[in-house]
Image (spheres, helix red, strand yellow):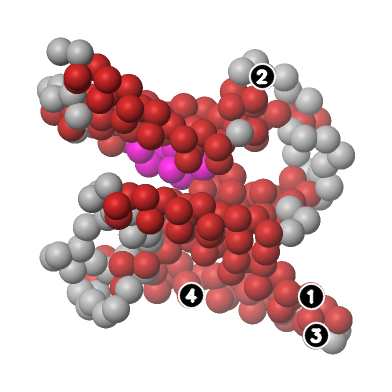
Amino acid sequence: MPKRRIQLFDALRGFAVCLMVLHHAMYDAVYTLGGAEWLYWNPVIAVLHYIFAGVFIALAGMSSRLSRSNWRRGGMCAMAAAAVSFVTALAGDPVRFGVLHLLASCMLLYALGEELSGRLKRKKTAGSGAAALSYALTAALVAFSAFAVNKLDYEFPFSYVLGWTGNGFYSADHFPLLPWAFVFAFGAVFGGAVKRGSLPERLQTLRIPLFPAIGRHSMVIYLIHQPILYGIALLISARR
């Protein structure tokens, strides 16, 4: 397990947060300040959206592999997600299952998996057979998610959590478990290599300016940046 914090991962998280802030700033520029729609609806912003989301979610998965308490991390993330849902519902632009809801769900599911894995190991049933079963189960889940998202057209209560949405569904931010939970899982798998110290020494000691500091405060920035951006946009609009 790494004995020191690796700046590279904090920097990647910080970079993803900066892209997220830019994404939301363009949204406010269009829908609050009345800017040209191409500022937000363009291929560059669309691609950046998936880049910062994927990086952020994968790094959360990696951190879960290194964390001392995923129950605590997941619980704190769940409370933040509930607060976001409450505030955005009051504002009339609800977030029903956004990125924080996804991360909280993945962290808590990962924590549950750790508990079950620990019990299996204590009973001495873990081994190559259990590892093969986990690989087979993961492959089956990947295949099922690809089929479910692209082929099935079925809606049931809270189906938007998995990725199925009806015509009347709306969420200002939507990151369903399928397929994003597997991005989280990819990060967790990579976290295993980091935990074993398999990362090259050069990457472990790489020094990067600015972005690591941003990455270390990513949750706070996530929670406060949009109210600040929206407030600035309102002030600019009022002065026109």
Amino acid type, label 3: Thr
* Region of the chain picked out in magenta, as a range: 47-56
Amino acid type, label 2: Ile
Q: In the rendered image, which residue does mark 2 sit on? A: 208
Q: What whole-number distance in Å separates the C-alpha atoms at marks 4 and 1?
A: 23 Å
User: Which x, y percent locates residue 136?
Assistant: 57, 75
First along the sequence among labels 4 and 2:
4
Residue found at x 64% / y 26%: 212
Amino acid type, label 4: Ala
Q: In the rendered image, which residue does mark 1 sit on? A: 118
For disc 3, the neighbor class at 10 Å (few under 14, some 14 to 19, many from 20) is few
User: Which x, y percent locates residue 112?
Assistant: 65, 73
Q: Is residue 167 above or below residue 100?
A: below
Q: What whole-number distance in Å separates the C-alpha atoms at marks 4 and 2?
A: 39 Å
Q: What whole-number distance in Å separates the C-alpha atoms at marks 3 and 1?
A: 10 Å
Amino acid type, label 1: Gly
First along the sequence among labels 4 and 1:
1
Q: Quadrant of residue 35?
A: top left
Q: Is residue 73 above or below residue 220?
A: below
Secondary structure mostly seen in magenta is: helix
Q: In the rendered image, which residue does mark 3 sit on? A: 125
Q: Could you tell whether 70 is left or right of 80 in the image?
A: right
Q: Assign a secondary structure to mark 3.
A: loop
Q: Are marks 4 and 2 in contact (CB under 8 Å)?
A: no
Q: What whole-number distance in Å separates the C-alpha atoms at marks 2 and 1?
A: 37 Å
Task: Between label 3 and label 1, give the one nearer the viewer.
Answer: 1
For disc 4, the neighbor class at 10 Å (few under 14, some 14 to 19, many from 20) is few
Q: In the rendered image, which residue does mark 4 sit on? A: 140
